[in-house]
Image: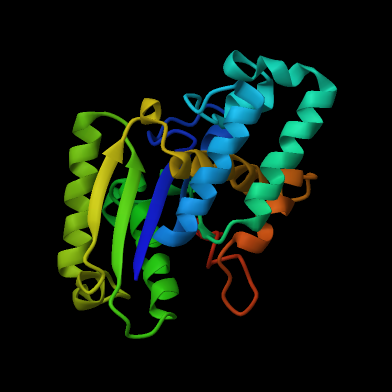
Amino acid sequence: MKFVLFIDESGHFDLNVNSHNDNFLAICGVLTSVTAYRKIDNDLKDLKREFCDTTDIVLHSRDIRNQTKDFIFLKDSFINKKFLTALSNIIENGQYRIICPVIDKGEVINRPQEEWGNIYHLAVTFLLERVLYILQQFGKIDKQLTIVIESRNPKEDKKLRKHIEGTINYGTTYIKSKDFLALNIKVFFNKKKDNINGLQLADLFAYPILRHVIYPNQKNFAYDLILEKIHKRHGIVEGAGVKVFPRK
């Protein structure tokens, strides 16, 4: 059975902390089967055609929230409501799971670097461990996992690829290498301009999850919308679909 994991981030991957909002980095993964993704992809293309008369447009979270650039048409309240309702229906009806490790940079910088290393790589490790747990629930059928990551720059992409390959070949504290190797993992990097709808979902989901972590008591309609899709362990999101590191 073929699966695909789309990965994008919200927040900055450097350790500069200038405000409370800069304290966190979220690495969001959207895991789905290739078959289920085809429907999601087609539905999002239909959405783009309906509201933008083209599929050559990127669903960028910031632009949608701020009603800017390609989404300035959302300033019309009637169209805004219609668009968000249609997008919400696609999100609710799609078959996928969300896994989103969040790094608390404010806490990390107070610890020796050898404890955590590269925070982006650390979050991806947490993500891959949880993806494997989910896929193991499908039993002993043959599985193939394709990982699609939003490209940052060639240098960072190369380092991340090396980290992922090392994770697969040597395992982690909790996962043996043979379990990763059994997934026949392939890794690809795509730029935002490549217009990959799965990456756009990861971008759309990363922001509300990050806001929920920063302001857990603040009303967050987008988070409430995707909560059912977030991976849970024994019905609990924390530590499973949303892992904050380090835990206070």
| Residue 135 percent location from the top left of the image | 40, 73
Q: Quadrant of the N terminus?
A: bottom left
| Residue 197 percent location from the top left of the image | 47, 40
Q: Residue at x 42, y 31 (%)?
A: 195
| Residue 122 percent location from the top left of the image | 34, 53
The image quadrant of residue 68 is: top right
User: In this rendering, would 228 be left or right of 60?
Assistant: right
| Residue 214 percent location from the top left of the image | 64, 44
The residue lying toward the viewer, choosing from 164 and 106, is 164
Q: Tally the numbered discs.
A: 0
Q: Residue at x 54, y 66 (%)?
A: 239
- Furthest residue in direction bottom, as rendered: 140
Q: Quadrant of the C terminus?
A: bottom right
Say how the picture is coloured: rainbow
- Furthest residue in direction right, as rendered: 78
User: In this rendering, would 29 be left or right of 40?
Assistant: left
The image quadrant of residue 193 is: top left
The image quadrant of residue 65 is: top right
Rendered view: 53 above or below 211: above
User: In this rendering, would 192 be left or right of 213?
Assistant: left
Q: Residue at x 44, y 60 (%)?
A: 35
Q: Is residue 215 visible?
A: no
User: In this rendering, would 8 be left or right of 24?
Assistant: left
The residue lying toward the viewer, choosing from 214 and 157, is 157
Rendered view: 216 above or below 126: above
Q: Is residue 56 visible?
A: yes
Rendered view: 33 above or below 62: below
Q: Residue at x 67, y 41 (%)?
A: 87
The residue lying toward the viewer, choosing from 40 and 160, is 40
